[in-house]
């Protein structure tokens, strides 16, 4: 009951409020700038849709995971970034518009890519099932609209109507976002405490390596193509912070296998830990230092 309230009510509500605050820091030109310089969007999309599943598959082989754990890891690698990535990007002073754009585009794209990737994983690792992957498409679309897109649009409208108020609220909202992030992390650990020990014992190391590898991929590819630090932060976070809620839905509802959620639980903890480290490092920097 408590877990249901957390994941279905409090978490989406908290993230929606945070997205509203993010919207108050954005103006339309933040998004039009992305369309004029699409390199960052392209790099982020390629990383998430192509390289992340390759890394996940390679680690499943390298760590010799059994079929259930391997498929759970592939669910993670195939999942898009979630609203939490937008929150972490904001606190890290990354490019919020880029982060939101990548979350939206990749989330819609994975409606097509997840069935292909997971069907291939099921066939390769031999789950012994002929299940057809059918994602809750309407739920995915509603999640993106209600938690991300609509609150950000409302925030941008507030910024346009009351610019002084929006600018004044930027620092308090960032502080509130940090506090909410900490509370969400504590709540998730508490809600998943029963599974945490088993998850870390079985796949703690491989999920940590996956998380670090995907974030490193995001950062180094961004810097390799000479993106600025704001864009690099966004791509790093989007590459390593996955939509854990969607991943758990796929494992437990679509594939009807609770054990496949074990890697997702472990990864959820790691991504909050590494996300916290990024926030501590980049969040304390002066805005002028984030070029």
Image (cartoon, rainbow, N blue to C red):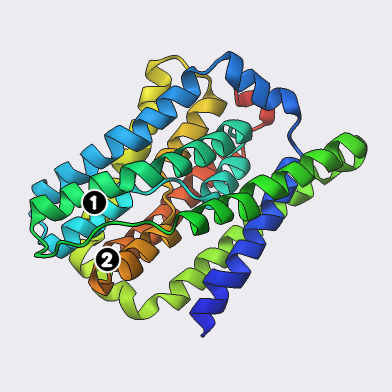
Tell me, yes or no, if residue 174 can be seen here: no
Residue at image x 9%, y 55%?
125
| Crowd around label 1: few <14 · some 14–19 · many ≥20 (10 Å) | many
Tally of marks: 2
Verify CB contact (< 8 Å) between mark 1 and mark 2: yes
Residue at image x 24%, y 59%?
72
Residue 240 placement (x, y as % from top left):
39, 44
- Against 5, residue 201 (above or below) is above
Q: Quadrant of residue 69?
A: bottom left
Residue 97 vs residue 281, the one in the foreground = 97
How far separated are the C-alphas under marks 1 and 2?
A: 10 Å
The C terminus - image quarter: top right
Residue 170 vs residue 149, the one in the foreground = 149
Under circle 1, the secondary element is: helix
Q: Is residue 217 left or right of residue 204?
A: right
Residue at image x 41%, y 31%?
45
Under circle 2, the secondary element is: loop
Residue 159 placement (x, y as % from top left):
84, 38
Residue at image x 48%, y 70%?
188
Q: Is residue 215 left or right of residue 102?
A: left
- Against 270, residue 43 (above or below) is above
| Numbered mark located on residue 255 in the image | 2
| Crowd around label 2: few <14 · some 14–19 · many ≥20 (10 Å) | some
Q: Quadrant of residue 230?
A: top right
| Numbered mark located on residue 118 in the image | 1
């Amino acid at each position: 009951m408590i877990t249901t309230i957390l994941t279905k009510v409090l978490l989406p509500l908290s993230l929606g409020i945070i997205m509203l605050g993010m919207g108050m820091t954005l103006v339309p030109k933040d998004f039009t700038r992305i369309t004029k310089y699409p390199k960052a969007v392209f790099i982020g999309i390629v990383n998430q849709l192509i390289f992340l599943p390759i890394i996940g598959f390679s680690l499943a082989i390298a760590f010799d995971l059994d079929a259930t754990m391997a498929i759970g890891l592939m669910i993670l690698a195939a999942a898009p970034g979630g609203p939490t990535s937008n929150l972490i990007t904001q606190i890290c002073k990354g490019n919020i518009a880029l982060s939101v754009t990548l979350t939206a585009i990749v989330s819609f794209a994975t409606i097509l890519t997840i069935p292909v990737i997971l069907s291939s994983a099921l066939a390769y690792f031999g789950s012994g099932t002929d299940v057809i992957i059918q994602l809750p498409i309407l739920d995915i679309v509603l999640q993106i609209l209600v938690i991300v897109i609509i609150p950000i649009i409302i925030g941008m409208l507030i910024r346009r109507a009351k610019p002084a108020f929006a600018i004044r609220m930027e620092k308090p909202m960032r502080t509130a976002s940090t506090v909410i992030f900490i509370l969400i992390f504590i709540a998730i650990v508490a809600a998943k405490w029963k599974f945490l020990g088993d998850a870390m014992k079985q796949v703690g190391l491989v999920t940590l390596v996956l998380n670090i590898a995907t974030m490193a991929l995001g950062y180094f590819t961004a810097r390799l193509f000479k993106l600025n630090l704001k864009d690099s932060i966004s791509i790093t976070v989007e590459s390593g912070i996955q939509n854990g809620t969607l991943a758990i839905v796929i494992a437990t509802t679509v594939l009807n296998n609770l054990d496949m959620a074990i890697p997702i639980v472990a990864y959820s903890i790691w991504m909050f830990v590494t996300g916290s480290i990024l926030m501590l490092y980049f969040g304390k920097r002066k805005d002028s230092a984030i070029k």
